[in-house]
Amino acid sequence: MRVNSRKIKSIGDRVQKARKNKDITQERLAEMVGVSTGYIGFIEQGQRMPSIKTADKLARVLGVKLSDLFE
């Protein structure tokens, strides 16, 4: 399935907003999720779409529902 760049950017915006609301750095979030800091940056910038597995980890760490990241 192909996802448009606007959708990917909106997911990144939601991740960034949730991260900042939790006062977590990209570095700390990456450590908690088990990915690189650069990958978190790519997600937040809308350059990468996280896998469902990574998105689930992000949601858990950030205290949001998985579905909230994709709305």
Image (spheres, helix red, strand yellow):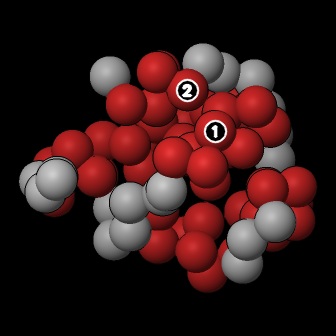
Q: Which mark is residue 66?
A: 2
Whether residue 44 is visible here, answered yes or no, is no
The structure residue drawn at horizontal position 38% and vertical position 60%, both measured from the top left corner, is: 49
**Mark 2 closeness class: few <14, some 14–19, many ≥20 residues within 10 Å:** some
Residue 37 figure quarter? bottom right
Query: What residue sits 38% from the left and 68% below the top?
Result: 48
69 lies left or right of 54: left
Q: Amino acid at mark 2?
A: Leu
- Image quarter (top left, top right, bottom left or bottom right) of the C terminus: top left
Residue 8 seen in this snapshot: yes
Is there CB contact under 8 Å for labels 1 and 2?
yes
User: Whole-Å distance between the Cαs marked 1 and 2?
Assistant: 6 Å
Q: How many marks?
A: 2
For the residue pair 18 and 32, the one nearer the viewer reads as 32
Disc 1 crowd, CA 10 A, few/some/many (<14, 14-19, 20+): some
- With respect to residue 30, does 3 lie above or below? above
Q: Which residue carries the number 1 mark? A: 56
**Does 27 appear above or below 11?**
below
Q: Mark 2 falls on what kind of element?
A: helix
Which amino acid lies under the numbered mark 1 shown in the image of this protein? Asp
Q: Which residue is pictured at 62% across the width and 53% down the height? A: 54
The residue lying at 80 percent from left, 37 percent from top is: 61
State left or right for residue 62 relative to residue 42. Answer: right
